[in-house]
């Protein structure tokens, strides 16, 4: 039995230390809620409180809270969603939470009028009743904020803040089949003299500003990745006109980046390939980029994959 020593231990800790084992130990946490989930066969089960309060995650001190309320406050602007995709990350959380038969253990971010919280919800079986589940809810914001920072460091280039090659491989595998898929390969023209003659500090300053240009063009699945010293890849989705407009904006804005020494004009050459098969597009875009350089640099070459 799970309760073999409960009463003996409660009496012992009371006699030895004058501690109430229930009140002072089990119920002492203000970042934990214990309760149950019923209506598990409905479309919107409820989280019900036995001990604790929904105050700890920014809600009123009510006896119950439906799943739908938690999910309606889901915070899409988190590091995990930015890598996995906002829709995909939310769907994964929702499906896991509603699959109560598999005893979900779900961690998710919410944002409401009080603030932003990370919460962990664990739902498990109660032997005495199959239609009622035990609920353990923890507020884990401090811990997950640190985890978020570590997570994003493994996926972004530390200098330019665009995604890195590791994330490029992940996103390419997930999204290459989507409609309107384009790969952009960007190389900075005449960048090497900045590092060699003006100095790496100036080179890093230029790359940081260029990274901000690329980040300003991102939206939803449209993302950039640093794959070399001054080489970048973009995975973008949409019509030719829009993709070319973005490429031209990058070319024009790159020429405006300020340098401490203006002896070298640093521009951008871009190769763009539109997918028909989704296979091996990055080398093909790279080849088009070199064609742009051979034709005089500071330009874009666009092609539909054969």
Image: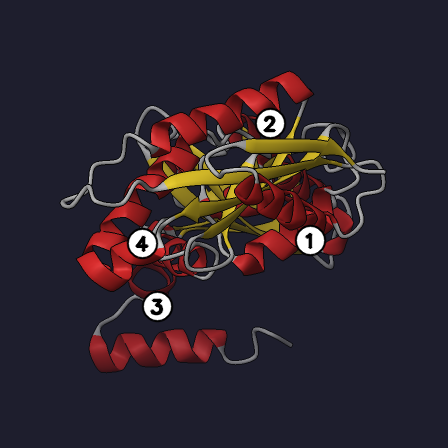
Task: Name the mark nearer the viewer: 2 or 1.
Answer: 1
Label 1 CA crowd tier, 10 Å (few <14, some 14–19, many 20+): few
The residue to which callout 3 is attached is: 21
Local SS, label 3: helix
Tell whether 303 sits left or right of 106: right
Q: Nearer the viewer, residue 220 or 224?
A: 224
Tell whether 172 sits left or right of 83: right
- Which callout, 3 or 4, points at the residue further toward the start of the chain? 3
Q: Is residue 155 above or below residue 19?
A: above
Tell whether 257 sits left or right of 187: left
The residue to which callout 1 is attached is: 283
Local SS, label 2: helix
Q: CA distance from mark 1 to mark 4?
A: 43 Å
Q: Could one spot residue 132 in this view of the protein?
A: no
Q: Could one spot residue 72 in this view of the protein?
A: yes
Is there CB contact under 8 Å for labels 3 and 4? no
Q: Residue at x 56, y 54 (%)?
A: 167
Task: Name the mark nearer the viewer: 1 or 4.
Answer: 1
- The label number, if any, that marks residue 142 in the structure image: 4
Q: Nearer the viewer, residue 239 or 76?
A: 239
Q: CA distance from mark 2 to mark 1?
A: 45 Å
Label 4 CA crowd tier, 10 Å (few <14, some 14–19, many 20+): few
- Point out residue 57 in the picture as x, y percentages from the top left corner: 38, 38
- Which callout, 1 or 4, points at the residue further toward the start of the chain? 4
The residue to which callout 2 is attached is: 68
């Amino acid at each position: 039995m799970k309760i073999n020593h409960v009463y003996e231990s409660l009496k012992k800790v009371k006699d030895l230390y004058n501690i109430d084992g229930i009140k002072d130990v089990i119920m002492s946490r203000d970042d934990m809620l214990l309760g149950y989930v019923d209506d598990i066969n409905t479309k919107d089960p409820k989280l019900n409180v036995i001990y604790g309060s929904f105050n700890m995650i920014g809600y009123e001190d009510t006896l119950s809270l439906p799943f739908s309320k938690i999910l309606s406050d889901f915070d899409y602007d988190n590091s995990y969603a930015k890598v996995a995709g906002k829709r995909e990350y939310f769907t994964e959380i929702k499906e896991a939470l509603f699959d109560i038969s598999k005893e979900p253990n779900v961690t998710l971010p919410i944002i409401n009028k009080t603030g932003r919280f990370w919460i962990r919800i664990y739902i498990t079986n109660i032997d005495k009743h199959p239609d009622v589940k035990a609920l353990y809810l923890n507020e884990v914001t401090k811990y997950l904020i640190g985890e978020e920072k570590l997570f994003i460091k493994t996926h972004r280039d530390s200098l330019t803040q665009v995604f890195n090659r590791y994330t490029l491989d992940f996103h390419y595998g997930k999204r290459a089949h989507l409609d309107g898929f384009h790969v952009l390969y960007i190389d900075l023209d005449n960048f090497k003299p900045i590092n060699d003659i003006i100095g790496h500090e100036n080179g890093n300053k230029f790359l940081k500003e260029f990274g901000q240009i690329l980040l300003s063009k991102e939206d939803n699945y449209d993302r950039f990745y640093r794959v070399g010293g001054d080489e970048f890849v973009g995975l973008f989705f949409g019509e030719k006109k829009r993709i070319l407009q973005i490429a031209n904006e990058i070319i024009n804005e790159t020429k405006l980046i300020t340098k401490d020494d203006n002896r070298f004009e640093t521009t951008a050459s871009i190769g763009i390939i539109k997918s028909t098969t989704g296979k091996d597009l990055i080398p093909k875009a790279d080849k088009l980029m070199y064609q742009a350089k051979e034709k005089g640099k500071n330009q874009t070459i666009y092609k539909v994959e054969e």
